[in-house]
Amino acid sequence: MTNADLTHFNPEGRARMVDVTEKKETERTALAKGTVYMQPETFKRIQEGKIAKGDVLAVAQVAGVMGAKRTPDLIPMCHPLLLTNVDIDFKENGVPDEKGKCSIDISATVKLKGQTGVEMEALTAVSVAALTIYDMCKAIDKEMSFGNVGLVRKTGGKSGTFVRKED
């Protein structure tokens, strides 16, 4: 692979933001997901609203939206985008898994009409929401972890639709 094959490098091999000036404006969407794992007692306290810092999922939802909007401030080569929709959803899994952990699945859908995709914004939204859940609950459960963060689907743009294969 040469530098010419890598879109974020100029001919001298230095980092650059990709030029999207000539790209066609299309409707673009991205869906990313991730999971936060925690002790059953932590999960129960989140559901019952007994976390000292407040409503965990409400705060994580707002944080995820803010994260999507601030993506170019965190990821150096991301373009500032005029997002038209950011939606964060949670699925609560109260039955402990084989490791004795309950979990909360996070999904983020991001949309716009523009010249570049919103995959990074969706991934950032999920990551920031997960970090917020950790931050709000770390006083009672420092063993929380999160993972399985990844792009599930994207539409629009020159490359068209992408759907991740089942793991």
Image: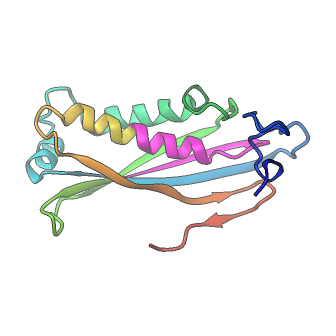
Colour scheme of this structure image?
rainbow
**Does 7 sit left or right of 145 as displayed?**
right
The percent position of residue 150, horizontal first and vertical second, equals 49, 56
**Does 50 sit left or right of 162 as displayed?**
left
Q: Where, quadrant-wise, is the N terminus in this rendering? A: bottom right
Q: Where, quadrant-wise, is the C terminus in this rendering? A: bottom left
Q: Is residue 142 magenta?
A: no
- Which residues make up the magenta segment? 106-128
Q: Residue at x 18, y 57 (%)?
A: 102
**139 vs 154: above or below:** above
Q: Residue at x 79, y 42 (%)?
A: 115
Q: Residue at x 49, y 32 (%)?
A: 67
Q: Residue at x 40, y 53 (%)?
A: 34
Near-viewer residue (161 or 73)? 73
Extreme right residue here? 22
Extreme left residue here? 41
**8 vs 54: above or below:** below
In which quadrant of the rendered view does residue 42 lie? top left
The percent position of residue 103, horizontal first and vertical second, equals 24, 55
**154 vs 126: above or below:** below
Near-viewer residue (57 or 20)? 20
In which quadrant of the rendered view does residue 92 lie? bottom left
The percent position of residue 135, horizontal first and vertical second, equals 26, 32
**Does 161 sit left or right of 146 as displayed?**
right
The percent position of residue 122, horizontal first and vertical second, equals 54, 45
